[in-house]
Image (cartoon, rainbow, N blue to C red):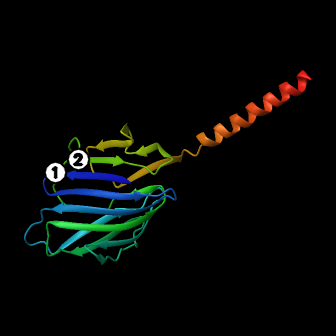
Amino acid sequence: MLLLWAVLSGALSGELDAAVSLERSYIVELTYQLELPPDAAVIPLRVLEAKGGRLHWLEANGSVVALDRSRAPQLEAELEVPASAATLRLRYEVTGTTIPVVVPLVEGLEARAGMFRASVELPFGAHLAGSFPTGAVMSNGVYHFELPVLPAFVSLMIVDDAPLLSFEAALDVAAVLFFLAIGVFLVRRR
């Protein structure tokens, strides 16, 4: 499970939750809390497909959103302001090693410490060998990092920890070797 929190000063805050699979595909759920001007009719969205991350589809508040791919790798979309203008729920699928962050374009955001926080919980048998943002700190099996700005993407280098032998298999091999050694010792004594 990949958990990312983006908290933006004043006009916007968001929480991103993505399920990470060992096949490197992600279903991302991103919820923004917005403070829009009363005359706002549309919410422009922008996303950057970079470094091997491909966004396949996008839903906003349960409806499919058409993505303008004419300026790829930068994709754009516009949403009508939802009835509950305070909440925007996005859901999308990504494959690759990079998770693009779909961002509503809001003016007047300023960088500040802790603006973007991420917590990454990887599937069993995997660990984080590198990431952007960098500087991940592990606590209780979860990687945490933060940035003073909202990134365009989150990049993960995930390494599988598949050991050559499991603990049980290693014990079986040790037992076989032990009995083989005893057999060789007894044969030589005769």
- At mark 1, the secondary structure is loop
Looking at the image, tell me whether mark 1 or mark 2 is earlier in sequence order.
1
Q: Is residue 54 above or below residue 63?
A: above
- Residue located at (14% from left, 76% from top): 83
- Left or right: 75 as drawn, with respect to 183: left
- Left or right: 108 as drawn, with respect to 56: left
- Left or right: 170 as drawn, with respect to 151: right
State the image quarter where residue 81 is shown. bottom left
68 or 3: which is nearer to us? 3
From this viewpoint, is residue 164 visible?
no
Q: Residue beneath label 2, please?
A: 115
- Which corner quadrant holds the C terminus? top right
Q: Is residue 32 above or below residue 129?
A: below
- Residue located at (74% from left, 37% from top): 176
Q: Find residue 41 and report its horizontal and vertical position in percent.
A: 15, 75
Neighbourhood count class around disc 2 (C-alpha, 10 Å): few under 14, some 14–19, many 20 upward: some
Please identify the residue farthest to the right as the structure is shown.
190
Neighbourhood count class around disc 1 (C-alpha, 10 Å): few under 14, some 14–19, many 20 upward: few
State the image quarter where residue 189 is shown. top right
Please identify the residue farthest to the left as the structure is shown.
38
State the image quarter where residue 80 is shown. bottom left
Q: Is residue 107 above or below residue 117?
A: below
Q: Find residue 62 and report its horizontal and vertical position in percent.
A: 28, 75
Three-letter amino acid code of the residue under disc 1: Ser
115 or 177: which is nearer to us? 177
Q: Find residue 46 and report its horizontal and vertical position in percent.
A: 31, 65
Three-letter amino acid code of the residue under disc 2: Met
- CB under 8 Å between callouts 1 and 2? yes
Q: Residue beneath label 1, please?
A: 9
